Image (spheres, grey):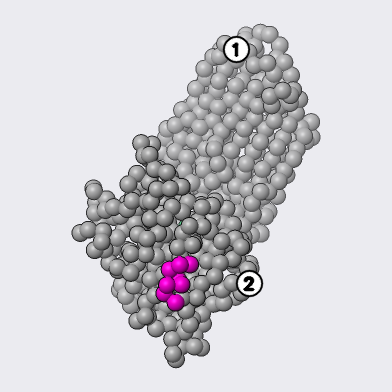
Amino acid sequence: MHIDELQPRSVWKRFFDICAIPHPSHREAALADALMRWAAEHGIEAKRDEAGNVAMSRPAVFGMEDHPGVILQAHLDMVPQKAAESGHDFERDPIRPRLDPKNPAWLVADGTTLGADDGIGVAMALALLEDHELRSGRLECLFTVNEEDGMSGARAIEPGFVTGSLLLNLDGEDEAELTIGCAGAVRTIAELSIPATAAPDGLAWFEAAVDGLLGGHSGVDIDKGRANATLALVGILARTRAELRIASISGGTAANAIPREARAIVGVEAARAAEFRAAFQSEATAARIALGDKDPGLAAALASIAVKPAASLAPKDAASMLTMLGALPNGLVAMEPDMPGLVRTSLNLGKAEGAVAPGTDRFRLETLVMIRSSSDDEKEALAATVERRLAGVAEHGWAVEQRRPAVSPAWSPDPGSPLLGKAVAVYRELFGKDPRVTSTHGGLETGLFRPRFPSWDMLSLGPTIRYPHSPDERVEIASVERSYRFARELVSRL
Ligand SMILES: [Zn+2]
């Protein structure tokens, strides 16, 4: 099989056209231009809004004018990731799709993300729009920009840009799943500061480190009982009950990633260094035992360092910081009662960075927490709890500033949705089995549409994609044919 022979031709042809035009997040204009040209050549009505989103439409076929309008929605951008040895330039080079040499049932790219997330959704929508055999009501395509880095395209859709009332989001990643809900999220950032002081002589200094943890995505792995490296380190240090000075602490890299590593520079009275070492080791062992096989690799180490930091937190301030961080809620909070296995509410201390700011005598700690919930009330209540706990250190003399750089609403599942009912029936008829009806603890653009377009009935679907956002991204070729057949049949029945 050659990639020119893949079926359905109409979908793959559009997908390979998309691959030929670089389209990482924030650089979708060239692809949008090409789509506008394509629409003009095919006599399809198309327009663009200020954000760069593209809408296309075709009228209902004769006799179906009174059917509700259907919106086929997908995002134009892709995550640009490449293998360490790849010389790919995402601004200029085309994506090079190929059959996976090890398993030709899958399509991959040559050392980069493939962009099947969500190029294959765009391609499916275009193929449906140009399919003259397809009998349907009014059909629209809605292609959004920048889904992968803040969803600014979806946030900017104005009422009237599309007019349908049934929305099929083609950003799903498993052909056997229909997604009917997603979590909302809040990111909250705190900046805490307090004067640092020069440490007295006679202290022993150490770098304390925790690593070897599994980490993972905070929307996918938060219920797996894995440790947060920052909080593991904080817990171990606090439980040694040593009188510590702290010169720096850092753990984690991003709001939506569970931290795998954390480290801190700590000082303790030299006479008690041996006692501290022993307590640190025994607390590390206890932490490892408590985790069991949920996160078996936890390694905690203390390494002596020769250079004394110029300034650090006094013991009472170090203690108030460790107590505050240790008291933050974290991880899984609640499961969805009606959907087995689905997380309802969780939070992740994604990043904590504390050190004496250069050129000042203040220790500054910045924390980034991401709260997710399919209930906006629970999300709000938990965010408020986190912010209250963080602000609590003000009592101990810390200056506190907090802000929320990003809030997105939840899309609450509606198991009684008529669109879902039809989709399940069509799926059963085509494939002889039930789809998995699910909600995701991650984010989807449909979550942003929900409060602004409350009358839309929405569903998310798509072919099977694995390892999105990584150079191993792959789409299962046969699932594209099935997913397309399913979407086409569903559209014809709405
Ligand atoms: Zn996507």
Q: Which mark is residue 416?
A: none
Which quadrant, please, contains the N terminus? bottom left
- Percent position (x, y) of residue 166? 51, 75
Residue 294 covered by magenta stretch: no
Question: Does residue 192 lie above or below 446 as drawn?
Answer: above
Q: CA distance from mark 1 to mark 2?
A: 61 Å
Give the farthest residue toward the bottom: 63
The secondary structure type at the circle numbered 2 is loop
Question: Does residue 192 lie above or below 465 as drawn?
Answer: above
150 to the left or right of 245:
left
Q: Amino acid at mark 1?
A: Val
**Residue situated in front as seen by the camera: 230 or 327:** 230
The magenta-colored residue range is 36-43
Q: Quadrant of residue 190?
A: top right
Count of numbered circles in the view: 2
454 to the left or right of 56:
right
Residue corresponding to mark 2: 159
- The 10 Å Cα crowd at callout 2, few under 14, some 14 to 19, many 20 or more, is few
Q: Which mark is residue 307?
A: 1
Label whose residue precedes the other's in the sequence (1 or 2): 2
Residue 442 in view: no
Ligand 1 neighbours mark 2 (CB distance < 8 Å):
no
Q: Amino acid at mark 2?
A: Pro
133 to the left or right of 373:
left
- Percent position (x, y) of residue 188? 66, 46
- Percent position (x, y) of residue 7? 27, 67
The secondary structure type at the circle numbered 1 is loop
Chief secondary structure of the magenta portion: helix
- Percent position (x, y) of residue 319? 69, 27
Q: Residue at x 37, y 64 (%)?
A: 14
